[in-house]
Image (spheres, helix red, strand yellow):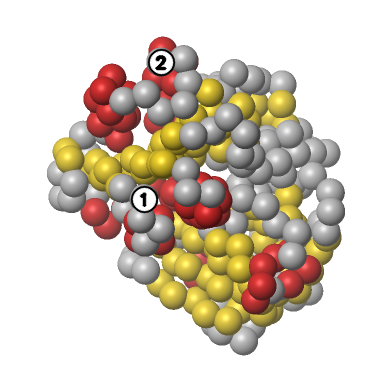
Amino acid sequence: MAGTGVYNGKILEHRHLNDYYSLLTIEVPEIAMYAKPGQFVMVACREQGSLDPLLRRPLSLHNILADDGQIQLLYQLRGKGTTWLWQRRPGETLSLLGPLGRGFRLPPEVNKAVLVGGGIGNAPLLPIAQVLAQFELESRFFTGARSEAHLVGVEPIAALGIPVHISTEDGSVGRQGLVTEELAVYLERERPDYLYACGPLPMLKAVVKLARQYGMAGQVSLEETMACGIGICLGCDCGGKKVCKEGPVFAIEEVVLND
């Protein structure tokens, strides 16, 4: 894979968005030069010389600033690794393995697309949204979260001029309910020809079901626990496919979503 390797990245900015999410801006031209929408990096969330925690953490590329040699990682505070990452400050260095995986593609037949994200699943959708905007393709963004506090990564997509439809389970912002409920209403009324999605497994299952029901092509990015990031350990197997290497992005017609 072009440009893939282990590189040291310098933290330029680390902004805690709220108690759950944080945005890292990292200078790492070796990755920014080759990264594609939907790819990810494996971050060593430990002190230099330490092996605790042993495994790197996979984080989606939220923004690729190739001209500046920078990437942005939008992540959720979850466990030991991200707790360590949360404490990092500008000027510090991170060990990054990447860019990794098969990302989002833009087939030539796409004219009207929908983006669907749930929670932190919004993170990898910005780069493909930028591509859609660059080619002036009509698109809409449907996003859902438990509450307003868990809604993240919306503003950069809205800033592209893409209409946004928000759903929250508690009704604290947008429409109360699941994102797939509002998506279903839209698909009954409109006929987009392509779909991009990333989010929790129950959401993806519902999205794939809707896409197949309405005869839509598309791609989904899977969130799976992984150890190596290069297809060796088989820890991220999903329906016989290695998410880290053959994914994380799969065509709707080929994806198998396990419980």
* 130 displayed left or right of 186: right
Determine crowd level at label 1: few under 14, some 14-19, many 20+ residues with C-alpha closer than 10 A.
many
Residue 150's disc is none
Question: As displayed, is residue 162 above or below residue 181?
Answer: below
Q: Residue at x 31, y 25 (%)?
A: 190
Q: Residues within 10 Å of mark 2 (few under 14, many from 20)?
A: some
The residue labelled by disc 1 is 162
Left or right: residue 190 compared with residue 195: left
Q: Amino acid at mark 2?
A: Tyr
Q: x, y percentage for residue 15? A: 44, 75
Snapshot quadrant of residue 27: bottom right
Residue at position x 50%, y 76% in the image: 14
Q: Position of residue 108 (x, y in %)?
A: 62, 34
- Residue at 56% in and 73% down: 25
- Percent of width and height locating residue 192: 41, 28
Q: Would residue 57 be visible to someone looking at this image? A: yes
Q: Is residue 79 left or right of residue 184?
A: right
Whether residue 170 appears in this view of the structure is no
Q: Secondary structure at mark 1?
A: loop
Using the image as rendered, state which of residue 230 and residue 103 is in the foreground: 103
Q: Which of disc 1 and disc 2 is earlier in sequence?
A: 1
**Residue 114, horizontal then vertical, whole percent:** 41, 36
Which residue type carries mark 1?
A: Ile
Work out how far the residue at label 2 is from the one at label 1, CA to CA, in angstroms.
22 Å
What residue occupies the far bottom of the structure in this picture? 91
On the image, which quarter does residue 9 sit in? bottom right
Identify the residue at image location x=54%, y=33%: 110
Secondary structure state at the residue bearing disc 2: loop
Marker count (numbered)? 2
Is residue 14 shown above or below 109? below
Q: Dots 2 and 1: beta carbons under 8 Å?
A: no
Q: What's the mark number on residue 214?
A: 2
